Image (spheres, rainbow, N blue to C red):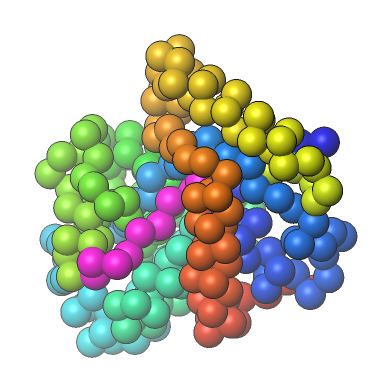
């Protein structure tokens, strides 16, 4: 049995008080892709860049709000981490999914979002939202004028919605390595890369050991974020 896993698997242990599975029973095989995330504000927000946004939020804690789809999802947890890193306190507003939050942001009912670039970029290009920064290590080719959070004063900050493949514990090592090699070969296909590109995703490849270390590092990174922000689901 193979599992198509996403970034949220890194903090499910902290998010849910009871899980129907043991995270230790999941063996990472290979990454697949990562969806860039971007911090945006309503176009009338009194900040033209990330530093101005941070100064405004620090000056008046809880005055401004950020929206997200799904309690404990990537958009929620990523903004909570950014807020903690930047030393700001915004009011969290939960929605059932990202699109309703996006509509309220465009309408001015909320002030900011940190979500997947494919969801936000069309509205930025249409002038309905203002992009302050992307959360990837490098700028996005499609938005070359938008700086990264890292180059805006937070060099260690990165947040992406990554996806990968895993198998259950006990799968023979030879099988895991063979699957990794097959996935890596498939990801080198131009057809696959173009398909991911159309979805706004960036292909990611690595060996089993490197991906396992990445997943372990993600768990250590995000668990304290949920604890500090008090993000949990009964």
Residue 133: x, y in percent?
A: 24, 55
How many callouts does the rendering have? 0
Query: Which quadrant does the N terminus fall into?
Result: top right
Q: Considering depth in this image, is 116 or 174 the residue closer to the camera?
A: 174
Q: Considering depth in this image, is 94 or 77 the residue closer to the camera?
A: 77
Q: Considering depth in this image, is 54 or 185 the residue closer to the camera?
A: 185
Residue 130 on the magenta segment: no
Mainly helix, strand or loop, the magenta region? Answer: loop
Picture layout, residue 12 above or below residue 63: above
Q: Residue at x 18, y 70 (%)?
A: 153
Residue 196: x, y in percent?
A: 46, 26
Residue 116: x, y in percent?
A: 43, 46
Picture layout, residue 130 above or below residue 149: above
Occupied quadrant, residue 57? bottom left
Residue 188: x, y in percent?
A: 44, 21
Q: Residue at x 23, y 47 (%)?
A: 138
Picture layout, residue 153 above or below residue 126: below
Left or right: where does residue 188 sit relative to residue 123? right
Q: Residue at x 54, y 72 (%)?
A: 220
């Amino acid at each position: 049995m193979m599992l198509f896993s996403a970034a949220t698997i890194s903090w499910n242990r902290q998010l849910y008080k009871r899980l129907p599975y043991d995270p230790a029973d999941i063996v990472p095989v290979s990454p697949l892709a990562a969806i860039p995330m971007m911090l945006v504000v309503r176009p009338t927000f009194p900040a033209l860049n990330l530093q101005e946004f941070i100064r405004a939020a620090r000056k008046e804690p809880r005055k401004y709000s950020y929206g997200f789809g799904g309690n404990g999802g990537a958009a929620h947890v990523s903004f909570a981490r950014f807020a903690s890193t930047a030393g700001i306190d915004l009011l969290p507003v939960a929605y059932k999914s990202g699109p309703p939050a996006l509509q309220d942001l465009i309408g001015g009912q909320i002030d900011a979002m940190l979500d997947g670039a494919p969801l936000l970029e069309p509205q930025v290009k249409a002038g309905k939202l203002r992009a302050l920064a992307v959360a990837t290590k490098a700028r996005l080719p499609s938005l070359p004028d938008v700086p990264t959070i890292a180059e805006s004063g937070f060099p260690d900050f990165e947040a992406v919605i990554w996806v990968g493949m895993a198998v259950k514990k006990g799968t023979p090592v030879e099988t895991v390595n063979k699957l990794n090699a097959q996935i890596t070969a498939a990801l080198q296909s131009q057809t696959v890369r173009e398909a991911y590109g159309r979805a706004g995703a960036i292909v990611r490849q690595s060996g089993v050991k490197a991906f396992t270390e990445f997943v372990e590092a993600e768990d250590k990174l995000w668990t304290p974020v949920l604890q500090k922000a008090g993000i949990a689901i009964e």
